[in-house]
Image: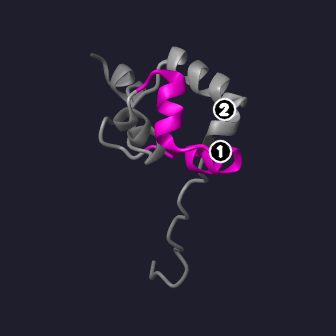
């Protein structure tokens, strides 16, 4: 693999900034995770992984089923958090 190809491959250990708003959407609709799991046909454990921002990937079929059950769009369910602030360089000696 060339250095250019390696640069294009994301670091597996790097933290992503995609967050899941499943808790908020469930609360707005008066649903529990168990009720959603039953409606969607996905285990509570897998929904919990998604809800707690620990999912490494989400199938489009899963995303579609969740959105259909909640009456929402993918952008309502997932968001990208702003990048962390970089430490200020002020006060550093040259």
The percent coordinates of residue 63 (x first, y second) are 56, 24
The percent coordinates of residue 79 (x first, y second) are 62, 42
The percent coordinates of residue 60 (x first, y second) are 54, 17
Note whether 72 is above or below 25 in the view shown: above
SS category of the residue bearing label 1: helix
Tag 1 near tag 2, CB within 8 Å: yes
Q: Is residue 25 magenta?
A: yes
Q: Quadrant of the N terminus?
A: top left
In this orientation, which residue lies closer to the viewer: 86 or 21?
Answer: 21
In this orientation, which residue lies closer to the viewer: 47 or 39?
Answer: 39
Q: How many marks overall?
A: 2
Which residue shows up at 59% across the image and 46% down it? 21
Q: Which residue does the numbered mark 2 point to in the structure image? A: 70
SS category of the residue bearing label 2: helix
Note whether 33 is above or below 65 in the view shown: below
Q: Residues within 10 Å of mark 1 (few under 14, many from 20)?
A: some
The percent coordinates of residue 2 (x first, y second) are 30, 18
Q: Residue 70 occupies which quadrant of the picture?
A: top right
Q: Quadrant of the C terminus?
A: bottom left
Which residue shows up at 65% across the image and 44% down it? 25
- First in residue order: circle 1 vs circle 2: 1
In this orientation, which residue lies closer to the viewer: 34 or 73?
Answer: 34
Say the numbered circle drawn on residue 25: 1
Which residue shows up at 56% across the image and 54% down it? 83
Q: Residue 44 occupies which quadrant of the picture?
A: top left
Q: Is residue 33 magenta?
A: yes
Q: Residues within 10 Å of mark 2 (few under 14, many from 20)?
A: many
Say the numbered circle drawn on residue 78: none
Distance, label 1 to label 2, CA atoms, is: 7 Å
Per the rendered image, the range of residues in magenta is 16-42
Colour scheme of the picture: one colour
Q: Residue 68 occupies which quadrant of the picture?
A: top right
């Amino acid at each position: 693999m060339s250095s250019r190809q390696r640069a294009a491959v994301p670091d597996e250990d790097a933290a992503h900034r995609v967050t899941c708003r499943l808790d908020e959407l469930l609360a707005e609709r008066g649903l529990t995770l168990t009720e959603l799991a039953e409606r969607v046909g996905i285990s509570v454990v897998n929904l919990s992984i998604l809800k707690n921002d620990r999912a490494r990937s989400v199938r489009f079929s899963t995303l579609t089923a969740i959105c259909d059950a909640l009456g929402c769009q993918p952008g309502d369910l997932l968001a990208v958090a702003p990048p962390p602030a970089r430490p200020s360089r002020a006060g550093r000696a040259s």
